[in-house]
Amino acid sequence: MRDGLAMLIATTVDLEIVGTAGTAAEGIRVALALRPDVIVMDLALPDRTGYEATREILLDLPQSRVLVLTMDRGRGTLSAALDAGARGYVLKESGGRDILTAIRAVAAGQLVFDSGIASAATALAYADEERARLFPELSQREFRILQHLASGTDNDEIARRLGIATKTVQNTISRILAKLRLQTREDVERRAREAGIV
């Protein structure tokens, strides 16, 4: 897939490949060395997740933009990619022309979603409106974790669904407790359920 995409980009006059990588570690090293405008990121990498690589790259290269190219249509995966800082989400089954259009759009500063995940993107937009209405003090990630807490999901499973470390989930729950002035995880679950969060 990577080689095919590189060949496709090589046929364009306005895009240039500056580097490729097959692992997260290599991708981070190449990105930091070459400072690309756009990074096309797979989420399923052999050494670490694409979320982790995206997050780490953008800490040092906030001006770079990440376009996720994946097989996964799930709302949780889309949510985790956006949390990590991705500016676009395109399915690998998309045509070459659509992928090139997405690269150009992300380079121009637009937020891009594949038409195949439009319903998931709409659901996320609705969830953000709900967050702003019910828990405006929480960030998007904090609100998503609150939703999982409301359904009784444990930390390890939340981490798996969102593509983040269990320690990150624990730290986020601590921030939620502080922001909502609550004492325990059970208090958070109760407050979420009382607000109608499922």
Image (spheres, grey):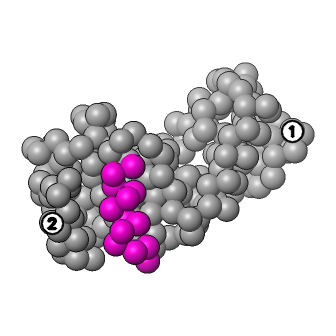
**Image coordinates for residue 12, horizontal then vertical, percent:** 20, 62
The image shows residue 140 at horizontal and vertical percentages of 60, 38
In the image, 46 versus 119, the foreground residue is 119
Task: Name which residue lies at 65% across and 50% down.
Answer: 124
Instruction: Return the residue at label 1.
Output: 195
- Amino acid type at mark 1: Ala
Left or right: 163 as drawn, with respect to 192: left
Secondary structure under badge 1?
A: loop
Q: Can residue 49 be seen by looking at this rendering?
A: no
104 vs 34, left or right, is right
Disc nearer the start of the sequence (2/1): 2
Q: Is residue 163 magenta?
A: no
- Range of the magenta residues? 93-105
Q: Residue at x 51, y 56 (%)?
A: 113
The quarter holding residue 91 reads: bottom left
SS type, badge 2 = helix
Q: Which residue is mark 2?
A: 10
Please identify the residue farthest to the front as the structure is shown: 13
Q: Label 2 is placed on what type of residue?
A: Ala
Residue 154, position in %: x, y?
64, 56
24 in relation to 65, above or below: below
Tell me which residue sits at (56%, 37%) in the image. Answer: 172
